Amino acid sequence: MRTEEARPVRLEDYRPPDWLVETAELDVSLHPAASRVRAAITLRPNGNGAPAPLVLDGEALNLVSLKLDGVALPPDQFVATPNRLTITQPPQRRFRLDIETVIDPSANTQLSGLYRSGAIYCTQCEAEGFRRITYFPDRPDVMAVYTTRIEAEKGEAPVLLANGNLVASGNVPGTTRHFAVWHDPFPKPSYLFALVGGELACVEDRLRTMSGCEVTLRIYVEPGKEQRCLYAMDSLKRAMRWDEAAFGREYDLDIFMIVAVSNFNMGAMENKGLNIFNDKYILASPETATDNDFERIEAIVAHEYFHNWTGNRITCRDWFQLCLKEGLTVFRDEEFSADQRSRAVERIGDVRGLRTHQFVEDAGPLAHPVRPAVYREINNFYTATVYEKGAEVVRMLKVLLGPENFRKGMDLYFIRHDGQAATVEQFVQCFADVASADLTQFMLWYSQAGTPEVVATGSYDAAAKTYRLDLAQTIPATPGQPSKAPMVIPLAVGLVGRDGRDLPLKLVNGRTIEHGVVTLTKPAESLLFADVHEPPVASLNRGFSAPIKLSTNLSSDDLRFLAAHDADAFNRWEALQTLATRLLVDNTAALRANGAAREDRGLLDALGATLNDGQLEPAFVALALTIPGEADIAREIGRDVDPDAVFAARTALRAALGKHLAAPLFDHYHRLTESGPYRPDAAGAGRRALRNTCLDLLAAAGRPEAVSIAARQYQAADNMTDRMAALSTLSLCDVPQRAAALEDFYSRYADDPLIVDKWLTLQATIPEPATLDRVKALTEHRAFSFANPNRVRSLIHAFALANQKEFNRADGRGYDFIVDTVLALDPKNPQLAARLVSALRNWRMLEPMRRGRAEAALQRVAAAPSLSPDVDDIVQRALTQD
Ligand code: PHE
Ligand code: ZN
């Protein structure tokens, strides 16, 4: 059962804690079904006198004993329920509590608190999991110094880890048990607490920090998988170096540890000195992981490491400030990846992710500000808006203030707030201070939900040699926010001349444009550029300087011109995407009305020119040839969406592309054949991405040679990237080779759950009517388990999110399947169930028949008895009409 706290929680109700915790000494004796937790905490009133009573958070706890300053507390002086410990008359001074509880880690299927991942004991405390271990003021503004003693059977858990530095270890005399004591000198909130116990192997390395301290680095995994940790270790070292160079941030303990576990609700967790990872984001070798996996591992290892400063040293005052650590840390990991790989390719990837996940969220009933003002279940706010849009807001600060002032602001933030639990206001104030800037209006990015829409209209006056740019912004209504104020929108712009070079930017009124950025602050503004000697093509929102939807009056010719010449690589890609989106939206409408899809020769030629432009990075070309996904097209259409028509329009364009460019696609496929051994670096990954994209488009065009090439590539591949790509291409073709290859794949990798996940996802994403029954059958497969989140996500979330056509079956059976799964999962793992039910959130965008079926499916969830707060919150919001 969950906390029956007074919900909803509101930002405006924030009050500082009445009591602070100075030290927390935990003594955890691990046992599969009954682990004993002895917590000694010293509390002191925060300020002058704390009001009685003292209320500590708990969840599903059993109190064994309770002492105050060493003396057992009489039963009439406290009330203990599973969810709360109330001490009615606490002393109005510093005092010590000794709390003993017993918990059952093996029965913990929620994977929050102390639980078991296979035979390994581990913890997950963010956001409110610590209260499932002991009674505590479980809020991030209570920061304490922790000492953790762990005891376990030597045979069962030879490795015992916790936050901080190891201070003692040894045997428990006269028993088969042993112990370890860890001390973390940095005060931290309870959500960053962690401990691990189990049979684990490790790889070890060292790093000397910029001030000359030696740090031991260890990655712990299931014995036998050590070789698959080397890339993660390499990524960690590069991330540590980068944070020193890019932000002046150094590591601060003697040891940094990562533990990879198989059962984990999220990607990874930044516990101080002891990161715990979903093993999917640690384990990689050329034979088992794709280029994409390597890239994610590098980014997530860096992300969790970067939290040491942005999240741990400076944490969040309350959970409304979640973006303070998450948005900022995503921004930092994106910059790291951009520096390690290709900046343009990284940016395109990030923007694709933002559009696919965050724009959709922002356009539906779950839309919320980057800093929400109210929540009923905080677990439901680990969202694309908090993370990805939160990162965009930090990026805009950099665009607005310039790199020097941005760095100064970050430095000030680290100095001013080190050791504190801070707020978004305090963060932004640092930038206002260093740049003497007024960022009041900018704060709207944190409080107003919805994706701003900017309409840009350009016109050239040949006689006056001026170019006029009219800009207008609107922000759509979102739940609880019917009307909005205009925002600060930094637009990086260029005027591209006939020869492809940027013309100088000069405004008629003498206003200068600093580093090519114009900032829109009013509902509408006009800019008049002077001395424009030829008709330019405007390149707007370069590098996606603001997370907005932009519509322009650029013609198809203008877009093709930008695709070929823009100095900004992002906008070259964007121009092609815009052309493709326009075509796909039109064709979806045409197909829905039983008309014919039109062909856009200009677009096909522009894509062909991109393919044959020898100057471009292969990774960039691969992205250019990847046309917008079904969910992106649906979002662009916005209402009355027929997913079958969207699919048909997209399939037709892919086929046309493969047909029109068949000769160069074959050429590039053969030209890009690698000779040397596989290396997961960005350049090699880019060549493989382009080669595999060529093959996929040829198969989409129905070329029989493509199928045989794919079948051959599948067999001959010496790495998982090429093998998976070939299998994925085959899986989209209804050919006999498909079943054979899928069967072969399973028999090769049946013992490797992370690879079997790829196999599950492939089968769940085949866009054909048989898929739903195949997915249902796979839930009975011995490789599948509802208890492991990676399995569930690979099969079921993949079906609901990455197979728009079959999930949105006209007969509604896709929705019914998801609802049945949600209801079965909810009692066991509410966080996982809540994420799954979110797949139905944008039901109002659908055409009437599907809309009705999806709504009925959501109503069926809503009507179920005893939903978790997690699922209940999502369903209530999804169904509310604002
Ligand atoms: N804080 C983690 C991260 O972003 C994500 C997470 C949240 C993990 C909640 C577990 C639970 O790095
Ligand atoms: Zn994070």
Image (tube, grey):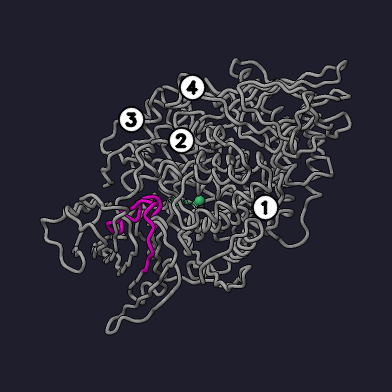
Residue behind mark 3: 860
Q: Amino acid at mark 3?
A: Arg
Q: Residues within 10 Å of mark 3 (few under 14, many from 20)?
A: some
Mark 1 vs mark 3, CA separation in Å: 43 Å
Q: Position of residue 124 (x, y in %)?
A: 40, 56
User: Which circle's residue, 3 or 4, is located before the other in the chain?
Assistant: 4
Find numbered disc 3 in the image and state the secondary structure of the residue it sits on. Answer: helix
Find numbered disc 1 in the image and state the secondary structure of the residue it sits on. Answer: helix
Q: In the visual, does 29 lie left or right of 512? A: left
User: Which circle's residue, 4 or 1, is located before the other in the chain?
Assistant: 4
Residue behind mark 2: 839
Q: Position of residue 278 (x, y in %)?
A: 48, 56
Q: Quadrant of residue 515?
A: top right
Q: Residues within 10 Å of mark 1 (few under 14, many from 20)?
A: many
Between residue 859 and residue 549, name the one nearer to us: 549
Q: Which mark is residue 722?
A: 1
Mark 3 vs mark 4, CA separation in Å: 32 Å
Q: Position of residue 843 (x, y in %)?
A: 46, 27
Q: Residues within 10 Å of mark 4 (few under 14, many from 20)?
A: few
Q: Is label 3 in contact with label 4 (beta carbons under 8 Å)?
A: no
Q: Which mark is residue 2?
A: none
Residue behind mark 4: 483
Q: In the visual, does 456 lie left or right of 113? A: right
